[in-house]
Amino acid sequence: MIMSTDPASYVQRHVWQGGQISTVEDQVATETPVAIVFNGISHVVMMATPSDLEDFVFGFSLTEGIVETADQLLDLEEISTDKGIELHALITAERFAGLKEKRRNLVGRTGCGICGAESLEIAVPNPKWVNSEILLSHAALQRAIITISEVQELQKQTGAVHAAAWCNLDGDIVVLREDVGRHNALDKLIGARARGNAIDPGFALVTSRASYEMVSKAANADMPILASVSAPTSLAIELAEKCGLTLVGFSRRDRHVIYANEQRLISELK
């Protein structure tokens, strides 16, 4: 049996309410193993929603430093199997050589996670410096915060996915990607931008917490502002301060909290 490639699946469920049991049909978010293969070598398997997978590969490749520019990813083939989806990417010989060298230097994992001084250096990234002088009004950020739930179609169907949106400086949501994984949703958004969508100045808004990985991915993709509906972690704040990214957390109606590089948020645009 080939696994479903639809982002949402129908299931039968039994609902107990008021002492009565009823059987209804419901939609749930599809979660599928997705293997990314570079030049014939399997690199990683992610649990992901099987939509916008081309954006996913582009975004993942860029934010993980496997390629430096979108044109270094030469070809992509998607293969559905009974175990999941394989994404076979062809990258340039130079970038593939770098990937093989990186894989040789990886320290093995144990039950406690990544251990040792060398692996700690690998675990905490050094993202690119964010060199942007854009200004965003608090009102525009609030506009995006208030409207993002209206355009999350898969979330409306399933209630089980995260979203990452690119918003312009007026607070309009230009492109939105959804996935069961918050990192995957952001990678898909970054991939969409790398492929020429939503390249106008703006900011990223995510419907999840802001971890250091999210900050690193946003900075490496030249996103000057990352706003999250939930809390940031301490390492995310430190990393944002270090790389010049404006980090906003607890982005809710009538309230948001700026944790790093607040100079880009202003009362009004002149």
Image (cartoon, rainbow, N blue to C red):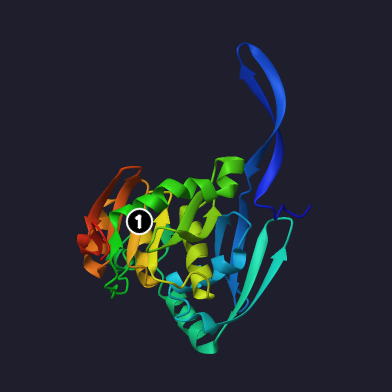
Query: Residue at (68%, 17%) from the top-left corner?
Result: 21
Quadrant of the image containing the C terminus:
bottom left
Q: Residues within 10 Å of mark 1 (few under 14, many from 20)?
A: some
Q: Is residue 204 above or below residue 4?
A: below
- The part of the image, by quadrant, that contains residue 141 is bottom left
Q: Is residue 8 above or below residue 122?
A: above
Q: In the image as oriented, which residue stretches furthest toward the front?
A: 270
Q: In the image as oriented, which residue stretches furthest toward the right?
A: 1
Q: Is residue 226 above or below residue 231?
A: below
Tell me: 60 left or right of 265.
Answer: right
- Of 68 and 121, the residue lying toward us: 68
List x then y, in percent, for residue 209: 37, 49
Q: In the image as oriented, which residue stretches furthest toward the top?
A: 19
The residue identified by callout 1 is: 140
Query: Residue at (76%, 55%) from the top-left corner?
Result: 2
- Residue 54 shows in this picture: yes
- Residue 210 shows in this picture: no
Tag 1 secondary structure: helix
Q: Amino acid at mark 1?
A: Ala
Q: How many marks?
A: 1
Tell me: 162 left or right of 15.
Answer: left
List x then y, in percent, for residue 99: 48, 79
- The part of the image, by quadrant, that contains residue 264 is bottom left
- Of 10 and 88, the residue lying toward us: 10
- The part of the image, by quadrant, that contains residue 204 is bottom left
List x then y, in percent, for residue 70: 51, 79
